[in-house]
Image (cartoon, rainbow, N blue to C red):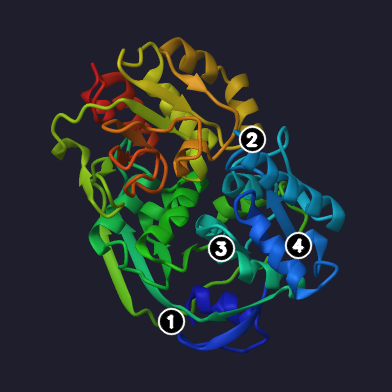
Amino acid sequence: MNLAEKLLAAHSGKKSVTPGEFINVRADMVLSNDITAPIAIREFKRIGVKKVFDPKKIVMVADHYVPNKDIPSAEQTKIMRDFAREQGIIYFDVGLMGVEHCLLPEQGLVVPGDVVVGADSHTCTYGALGAFATGMGSTDIAAAMATGDIWMKVPHSIKFVYHGKLPKWVGGKDLILFTIGQIGVDGALYAAMEFTGEAIDELSMDGRFTMANMAVEAGGKAGLFHVDKKTLDYVIGRSTRPHTVFEPDKDAVYTQVYEWDVSKMEPQVSLPHLPSNAKPVSKLGNITIDQAVIGSCTNGRLSDLRIAAEILKGRKVAPNVRCIIIPGTQQIWLDAMHEGLFDIFINAGAVVSTPTCGPCLGGYMGILAGGERCVSTTNRNFVGRMGSPKSEVYLASPAVAAASAVAGRIAGPDALD
């Protein structure tokens, strides 16, 4: 069996599973947020169950529209807050919260060997920890909160091998944008994407989180990394929960194997209106921008902010550009502040926000008007994703977003003086 099959077999009470097989899987963690939790709560109550299966295995995070931007978002959050208090489940509110997929690993709530289901498509982020993590609809999450089980069709697995040493300014975001560009937004439809190779071995945990996060943008059911010393160093000290390391068999079967040498890769940018519309930054020409966003569950971690600060230090954001920087959690916010990164950002002419999903989903904190362009470290650039359907979103790494904010056009760091 491969990595996904090992994880699912262990959580379904079976010695082995095969792609296409329908199984019941025991969940180690069930997640929802201020958009999806109210629907799940409503359905949970319709079932007629009085108590969740295990309050220590259910997490709700207020992150999409918080601090609340209007009355409807306040009502949404109140539904979740009241239910969380009633049930005694793990709950993160304003002051304690963060973008959910940055927050759960940071808090040690996910460990290697887990199965995690969440009412958010980017739940696949936790595959960076050697967990099987996937997004589901709110009604499925209601059933999971009630029973602790979910049913699932075992996905087929695709192996992605990245050879070589990554050049400076090229990281996890570039690898995943390149990959989606090569296989398309449905190239891994309902597949477990298993990431390996020398470049992956050298990649930081933050870079791995970024790649796993965007597996869903290729249609993936999950994005998985092997557990190594970096993984264990990240987990130990954050969590007291026991963990299990699974490894694929040497003769594991994959429906496809892709291999690339990435030693000469350039920073990548996905042009509107699909993540698969990826090109090297040097091939874009002169594309002026109105806004740059650095943050989200894809690239709101401390190393992302350090990269942005390295580029913005001693420079100024272009006069016609708004640069919005959003740390992924309160802890990341504090760490960045203590390191002096906020001084760099503000002196450069950027603004720093409290942790929020905000602009990524067109919520608030950076909505685009018609005709405006934004380069963003977020994960989707569909029509109208960040505001007006007549706006444009370009996906890129923190390095490209920061350099573009200075240049006033989409550019890589090497294009700056």
Query: Residue 68, which numbered label?
Result: 2
Whether residue 128 is visible to the viewer of this picture, yes or no, is: no
- Is the residue marked by circle 3 packed among few (<14), some (14-19), or many (20+) residues within 10 Å? many
Q: Nearer the viewer, mark 4 or mark 2?
A: 2
Whether residue 286 is visible to the viewer of this picture, yes or no, is: yes
Instruction: Give coordinates of residue 236: x percent, y percent.
Output: 69, 50
Element under disc 2? loop
Determine the CA span between mark 4 and mark 2. 26 Å
For disc 4, the marked residue is: 57
Determine the CA span between mark 3 and mark 1. 17 Å
State yes or no: discs 1 and 4 in contact (Cβ < 8 Å).
Answer: no
Q: Is residue 118 left or right of residue 107?
A: left
Q: Residue at x 35, y 44 (%)?
A: 384
Determine the CA span between mark 1 and mark 4. 31 Å
Task: Give the residue type at disc 2.
Answer: Asn
Determine the CA span between mark 2 and mark 1. 48 Å
Q: Nearer the viewer, mark 3 or mark 1?
A: 3
For disc 3, the marked residue is: 130
Element under disc 3? loop
